[in-house]
Image (cartoon, rainbow, N blue to C red):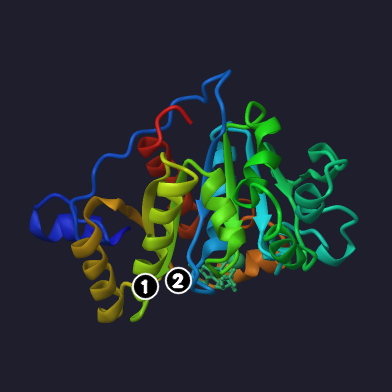
Amino acid sequence: MTDSQDLFEASGQPPLGPTGRLMPHIPEPSPPQPGGRALVLAMCNQKGGVGKTTTVINLGAALAETGRRVLLVDFDPQGSLTVGLGFNAHELELSVYHLLMDGDVRLPDVLLHTRTANLDLLPSNIDLSAAEMRLVTEVGREQALARVLRPVLADYDVILVDCQPSLGLLAVNALTAANGVIIPLECEYFALRGVALLQETIEKVRERTNFDLQIVGLLGTMYDGRTLHAREVLQTLVEGWGDTVFHTVIRRTVKFSDSTVAGEPILSYAPASAGSESYRQLAREVLARCPGA
Ligand SMILES: Nc1ncnc2c1ncn2[C@@H]1O[C@H](COP(=O)(O)OP(=O)(O)OP(=O)(O)O)[C@@H](O)[C@H]1O
Ligand SMILES: [Mg+2]
């Protein structure tokens, strides 16, 4: 039983979600629309270890479960997304780096199919760190990722880009290629530090290279409802950002690290777990906020 149901039964009032707001009805997603262009979402926060990669893997798997064709892009030289999906990042012959830097390499040559149906990956490894330096001198350096993704926009319903923890040129490329940004935040003190800086970067990208960029939502991660400070962090987040904060909150559970070690999404590793349900709910929220995807 969820906390919100507890509250409902105790008070007779409608259930409050973990963010302290009334939990709205989040509709089941409609089937994917044939013939559209992929919705591109960047998972971005320059703070490290906030759940970006975990969210890309599991939101991606939850969207794939709805029948959507999903492409995940590892845009972090750490290669955590690649490893988290069961691939050996060191042994890649071709990666996103080659797509960015070598005009002769084609996307299908780099593409990997994961063990999850409808879920593909463009992998990366440490090579990508060189791209940041090499791109600096190129014409259209902010649009390099957008150029790479353009030929497959019709092949996917959703593309999720996993950013590295920095606001450098790679992050600007991800934001330039994206229709929307999702910002995961650990429910800890200091989580909000740095969001203003990220917002500034998003504004700059909006002014210069991507007028239509939207913040799709802020996502509370690693939430422990037993601690007062986790609840306070969510409260502060909602005070500052209102309904931009997702109603879905991802709780802290070791199952996420376990599933990463197993090299698969929590949705297949522990399909009935609370973590899996949270990411399915997040997928419904994202689709409700991004109609047409
Ligand atoms: N909800 C959660 N509960 C418990 N552990 C989690 C949760 N989400 C992520 N983790 C773990 O926390 C660590 C950091 O998560 P993750 O790699 O997703 O963050 P990140 O923002 O991508 O990090 P980086 O900035 O280094 O790329 C990982 O070991 C992951 O398994
Ligand atoms: Mg990561």
* Apparent side of residue 180 relative to residue 241 in the rendered image (left or right): right
Secondary structure found at label 2: loop
Quarter of the view holding residue 106: top right
Secondary structure found at label 1: loop
In the rendered structure, which amino acid carries the disc numbered 2? Answer: Arg
Q: Is mark 1 within 8 Å of ligand 1?
A: no
Q: Few, some or many C-alpha atoms within 10 Å of disc 2 (few <14, some 14-19, many ≥20)?
A: some
Q: Quadrant of ligand 2?
A: bottom right
Residue, far left? 12
Q: Is residue 163 visible?
A: no
Q: CA distance from mark 2 to mark 1?
A: 9 Å
Please give the name of the residue rendered at 41% of the width and 39% of the height, measured from the top-left corner: 212
Q: Earlier in the sequence, mark 2 or mark 1?
A: 1
Q: Is residue 222 above or below residue 52?
A: below
Question: Which mark is nearer the camera, 2 or 1?
Answer: 1
Q: Position of residue 149 (x, y in %)?
A: 67, 39
Question: Which residue, given by chain and number where applicable, does mark 2 sit on?
Answer: 252
Q: Few, some or many C-alpha atoms within 10 Å of disc 1 (few <14, some 14-19, many ≥20)?
A: many
Please give the name of the residue rendered at 22% of the width and 68% of the height, measured from the top-left corner: 235
Disc marking residue 187: 1
Please give the name of the residue rendered at 63% of the width and 31% of the height, measured from the top-left corner: 153
